[in-house]
């Protein structure tokens, strides 16, 4: 019993060390690549190296979080390969351990890491991404054009105009108020419309009431006034295209908020399911890594396993993307599109693990 505990603790410690080292390599690589992108973005600004470096440190943790399943896969392959190359696995088997019991400890750690990342790391990375977008957005050429969805409605800022709407209904904004200002931010007049057809950037305002700066009505019940905007329904629906800015703990509230404003929440619900599946995804990666390395007896070159790991990562990535696309286009339910890749990888790996356990 004591021997088993000692071996399990050794496996836990060694695998954790491999995960940390692999994570540091990927984090540094992501930091370097993103730093070049930020430097290229700020090439026309006199900001020096400090700001691109800070922005890289704000953005890369989110990138690292999204890459973590593949980091676990590579770590698992490297770890199992190491204990096999050094013949430590033979000593463990002599002590009564099977391939499955050797894989079990990294598997438990991967699930714990998955829960840790979802509940604690994800809220931090989402906050950092928000800071990254707000800081970098201040240098965007279109910073005079902003849009947001709040509990008070849909808000849009366009140069000298501020627009508020209560809800989006298909291709129309409902209960629209347009506040017009001059170049010195002095209020000029307000348009109150029952709805605005925003199928194109030439909005069609219906049942419009125009009120001057003194609160007096200028025109009432005017139909089909054209308002030129840089937004259309497609652009407004993509306000939350970067879901990395939403914390796991806030997803449910954001889903309810968007549903109340008439927005589709399929992508958000997909993000929620992906978060719930994250620990199991990491578990399937460990199983897959164990099957790749412990499922064969021959001691092949490390480059073979590097190639297999990269090929498996690319295949899994595009399989996930394909399944997610089916969910977004209503070909599959959100739950099926998210959990199907995880379950398939888990089943295939489990079958391979049973085979490897017999060796």
Image (cartoon, helix red, strand yellow):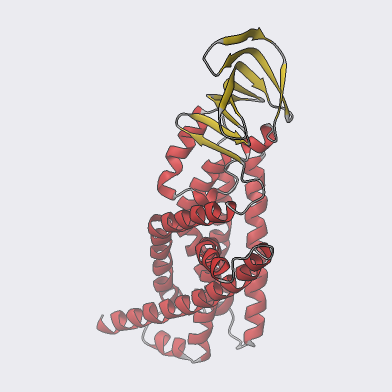
The total number of labels drawn is 0
Q: Position of residue 357 (x, y in %)?
A: 49, 75
Q: Position of residue 264 (x, y in %)?
A: 58, 34
Residue 296 lies left or right of residue 111; in this view the side is right
Could you tell me which quadrant the N terminus lies in? Answer: bottom left
Residue at position x 54%, y 78% in the image:
25
Answer above or below: position of 282 versus 206: below
Do we see residue 333 in this rendering? no
Which residue in the rendered view is the most extreme toward the bottom?
86
Residue 267 lies left or right of residue 226; in this view the side is left
Residue 2 lies left or right of residue 135; in this view the side is left
Which residue in the rendered view is the most extreme toward the front?
184
Which residue in the rendered view is the most extreme toward the left?
2
Q: Position of residue 193 (x, y in %)?
A: 61, 16
| Of the pair 60 and 277, the residue shown nearer to us | 60
* Figure quadrant of residue 327: top right
Residue at position x 30%, y 83% in the image:
6
| Of the pair 338 and 188, the residue shown nearer to us | 188
Do we see residue 171 in this rendering? yes
Answer above or below: position of 134 versus 287: above
Q: Position of residue 59 (x, y in %)?
A: 54, 62
Residue at position x 53%, y 57% in the image:
132
| Of the pair 80 and 254, the residue shown nearer to us | 254
| Of the pair 111 and 125, the residue shown nearer to us | 125
Residue at position x 48%, y 79% in the image:
21
Answer above or below: position of 326 versus 118: above
């Amino acid at each position: 019993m004591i021997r088993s505990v000692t071996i399990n603790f050794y496996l836990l410690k060694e695998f954790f060390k491999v995960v940390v080292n692999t994570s540091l390599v990927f984090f540094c690589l992501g930091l370097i690549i993103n730093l070049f992108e930020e430097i290229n973005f700020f090439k026309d600004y006199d900001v020096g190296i400090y700001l691109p470096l800070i922005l890289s440190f704000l953005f890369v943790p989110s990138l690292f979080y999204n890459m973590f399943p593949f980091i676990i896969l590579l770590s698992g392959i490297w770890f199992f390969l190491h204990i096999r190359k050094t013949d430590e696995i033979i000593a463990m088997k002599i002590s009564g351990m099977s391939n499955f019991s050797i894989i079990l400890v990294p598997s438990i750690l991967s699930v714990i890491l998955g829960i840790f990342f979802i509940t604690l790391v994800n809220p931090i990375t989402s906050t950092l991404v928000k800071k990254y977008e707000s800081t970098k957005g201040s240098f965007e050429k279109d910073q005079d054009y902003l849009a947001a969805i709040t509990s008070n409605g849909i808000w849009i800022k366009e140069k000298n105009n501020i627009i508020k709407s209560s809800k989006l209904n298909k291709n129309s904004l409902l209960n629209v108020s347009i506040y017009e200002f001059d170049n010195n931010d002095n209020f000029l007049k307000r348009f109150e419309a029952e709805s605005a057809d925003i199928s194109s950037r030439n909005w069609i305002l219906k049942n419009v009431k125009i009120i001057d700066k003194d609160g007096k009505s200028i025109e009432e019940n005017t139909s089909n006034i054209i308002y030129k905007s840089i937004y259309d329904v497609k652009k407004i629906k993509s306000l939350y295209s970067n879901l990395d800015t939403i914390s796991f703990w806030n997803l449910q509230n954001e889903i309810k908020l968007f549903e109340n404003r008439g927005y589709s929440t399929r992508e958000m619900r997909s993000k929620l399911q992906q978060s719930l599946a994250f620990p199991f995804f990491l578990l399937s990666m460990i199983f897959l890594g164990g099957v790749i390395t412990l499922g064969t007896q021959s001691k092949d070159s490390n480059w073979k396993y590097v190639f297999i790991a990269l090929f498996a990562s690319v295949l899994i990535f595009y399989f996930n993307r394909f399944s997610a696309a089916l969910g977004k286009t209503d070909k599959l339910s959100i739950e099926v599109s998210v959990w199907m890749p995880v379950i398939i990888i888990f089943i295939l790996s489990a079958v391979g693990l049973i085979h490897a356990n017999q060796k």
